[in-house]
Amino acid sequence: MGLPLHLPAHGRGRGLSPALQRLLRQRPGRWDLPELPEFGGPLIDSGAVAEAQRRCAHQLGAGAVWFGVNGASGLLQAGLLALAPPGSRVLLPRNLHRSLLHACVLGQVRPLLYDLPFDPATGLWRPPGPAHLAAILKAAGPVAALVLVSPSYQGQRADLPALVALAHGHGVPVLVDQAHGRGEALGAGADLVVLSGQKAGGGLAQSAALLLQGQRVDPAAVARALLWLQTSSPSALLLASAEAILQELTSPGGRHRRRRAEQIGERLRRRCLAAGLPLLANDDPLRLVLHTAALGINGLDADAWLLERGVIAELPEPGALTFCLGLGPPVGVVWRLPRQLQRLRRALGGHPLPPFSAPPLPLVAEPELPIGQAWRAPAETVPLAAAAGRIAAEPLCPYPPGIPLLVPGERIDSARAVWLQEQARLWPGQIADTVRVVAGSGGDGSACVDESPAIGGS
């Protein structure tokens, strides 16, 4: 019997919300409804969907809620376009999901990419602290919005109340990508919050919700952006899934089910630590992150070895391997997973891997060429070893989770080129040893090696 520890968080149906389970047990297709007057849709003021959105907003303490059927990706894009008019600048973290880059192209928005603290032991970005964000806001100057990611894919949370208050003190509204969280950003004062049904709730893939509070964002602007980006025929099943995940956040039954899953996660963590397995400290009992680098193992190699033995992780990275327990953890996971991880250590383990190199990035940087222009420009493929001085034409993303190591329009200086070559070695099969660059954007690095326009120090 396999051990699936990946998304969706419903664990192949074990953790689906009871309301969604009842719906799926109905006659096949009975729930596939159009936007009939009594049913409505996310942008229609009357009908069952509108009533459900108002009910969820009241229960969560939000000013408004919109259900989405294009995942957190589509709602992140709508949120950003609602905040940022064409030509405006927005602060995006280096661990952004690439869907936000797509929004910048669609909305002709100028991304200012801000660097994050880096952990050389794991190779992971860490959440920014208030002092770090203060330096970013000072360096950036006037911006239309700030995007924060919390928690991270690995379950690490930022101090959102402090960060949001800091941004608001500078007059900057905040959009929080909380696809891996449960809406805590709303209590922290964020203006817009995006939740995912499949990543942290008992919902189906592609179901999501966008939450608004306060007076800094015009609800009409959000509705307009959703109109541009969302289908005119949303799936009734996915809308029901979006409602179900929000109900699970506030209902006694939902809280009980989550706490029961978290207790299993806490027992699993204790058992792993007792066995001497190195784990990354995080804030989510349902995300277990094995520090593979401490075992002397690349996380991608660990993932391949475990996959052959029926253990399916969620996110392999060079220094870590993330497992998602979900709301219905597999039977026996508390003893089955540690046993397999001990076998992994015996089979592949060795001396700890050397520290990972932080990306050589300035604190804040805007792509030298507008991102949409670079992405559409005639391009050519060159070896990473010959990329210095060239302007990127496409994002470079190990997948999952779609976090770009390189953004279209950025000029690749010599240090960045060397670092990208190292990333290609660390991500075998995920990063090619070539990169797409804008045709005619520089030579071999001898004449055109300036960094992307930088603001602040590195």
Image: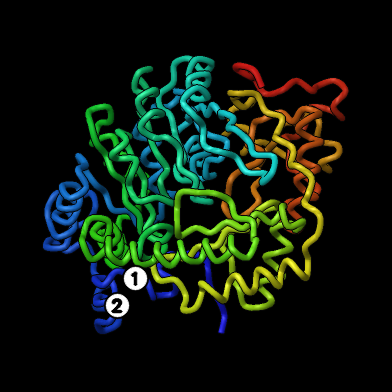
Q: Position of residue 266 (x, y in %)?
A: 45, 61
Where residue 201 sits, quadrant-wise, is bottom left
Q: Which residue is denoted by mark 1 in the rendering?
A: 16
Q: Position of residue 199 (x, y in %)?
A: 43, 58
Q: Which residue is depicted at the point 42% across and 63% down?
A: 205
Per the image, label 1 sits on a secondary structure element best described as: loop
Q: Residues within 10 Å of mark 1 (few under 14, many from 20)?
A: many
Per the image, label 2 sits on a secondary structure element best described as: helix
Q: Give the amino acid type for the residue marked by disc 2 in the picture.
A: Leu
Where residue 21 sits, quadrant-wise, is bottom left
Q: Which residue is depicted at the point 22% across and 28% down?
A: 215
Q: Which residue is depicted at the point 64% across and 73% down?
A: 340
Q: Is residue 221 left or right of residue 84?
A: left
Q: Is residue 270 left or right of residue 182?
A: right
Q: Quadrant of the N terminus?
A: bottom right
Question: Separation of disc 2 and disc 1 at Cα?
Answer: 10 Å
Total marks in image: 2
Where residue 383 sits, quadrant-wise, is top right
Query: Is there a contact, CB below 8 Å, between mark 2 and mark 1?
Result: yes
Nearer to the camera, 324 or 222: 324
Q: Is residue 400 above or below residue 263?
A: above
Q: Give the amino acid type for the residue marked by disc 1 in the picture.
A: Leu
Nearer to the camera, 72 or 443: 72
Q: Which residue is denoted by mark 2 in the rendering?
A: 24
